[in-house]
Image: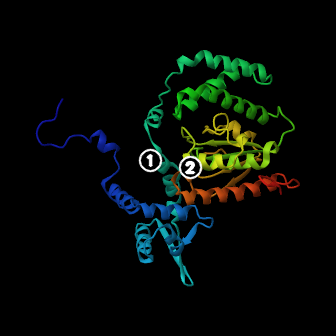
Amino acid sequence: MSIQGGSAGPTTSAEAHAIGADAAADLAATLKAIADPLRLRMLSAIATSATGETTAGDLATLTAVSQPTVSHHLKVLREVGLLTSDRRGTWVWYRIAPAYRGAVTTLLDRFAPAAVEVHGAHAAAAYGEVAGLADVDPALDRIAASLSEHFADTPERECYRVVRESYTALARRGGNAAHLVPLTEHFARQRIIDAEKARGAQDAHPPQVLFVCVANAGRSQLAAALLRHYAGDRVVVRSAGSAPASDVHTAVRGILDELGDPAAVDAVTRFYPKPLTDDAVRAADVVVTMGCGDACPVLPDKRYEDWTVGDPALASSAGVAAIRDELDRRVRELLASLLPTEGILTTEGTR
């Protein structure tokens, strides 16, 4: 029965689900404040600072604008509540407001990379389209059969399950479909190894480190490659992402190539974006997180470290180099703690 005349009808579906007008106005004001390239760079610099705070003088190095202009941008961010500040001596120190820390982390580590690199394959993956799964059934069956023969401690049905899950997870991140089958074989093999280690099937093993970020396309890839470069086979290295991208960032690939270490930069069979799995966490002795928030499971008897490091996907050439240097320093310190009685292998020899 339709309603005639000018009487008010029921609340529409859109009205019932949309945020309120007042909330939208407040949100728009905050988004307007950060809708400036320099302000976004300032937020990222403050959020990834080792101490969580910085001065206007430090932020002035981000651009050629004058100090008063930098101060103006900081004032805008402070007026909407994104930043807090306090004066110590002659310097004013700025930090992310506590209420906004989680939101800023989400903006920089999740939304920003997606906005920069989104394309058709990512969009298809967002809708859960896994094209061609039926066409690869024979290949997946062969992989599962081969793995079941190689891993006697893992039941055959478990190998088939892991292979199918691995293919689906990798297909959902997008990327070149032609690489899915060989990547599936490597990822499934890695998962089974991790599962067997977590069950105690391998008693003696070198320390295992898992690097985790959001996309597994920048920081975690670079950290993993650096640790593999310095440690060789003395440490088992893994990396994963809570929301893996389809490929490693171009800037990071360039840095990996500069290592000149094929074993650490084998992007096809080892250093490709991979989904985070519980087995990888259980198998790890050390879990290093970088910007993935609470997506990584926290298990007892694990050593966890959280590294505050910028995202190379959004950085300038100089910024990428600085991120590389910071990760290099942290990786060396981590390796020294894992193997305190051994030297660190470098391109110049052993230190």
Q: Which residue is at the front of the view, 173 or 272?
A: 272
Give the residue at x 57% y 19%: 136
Residue 23 to residue 243: above or below: below
Mark 2 lies on a secondary structure that is helix
What residue sits right under mark 1 in the picture?
115
Q: Is residue 323 left or right of residue 68?
A: right
Q: How far from the left and from the top, in percent, is residue 147?
A: 73, 22
| 107 relative to 7 in the view: left or right | right
Could you tell me which residue is drawn at 54 percent across and 65 percent down? 46
The disc at residue 251 is 2
Tag 1, which secondary structure?
Answer: helix
Q: CA distance from mark 1 to mark 2?
A: 17 Å
- Name, please, the residue furthest toward the bottom: 89
For badge 1, the amino acid type reads: Ala
Q: Is residue 298 visible?
A: no
Q: How many marks?
A: 2
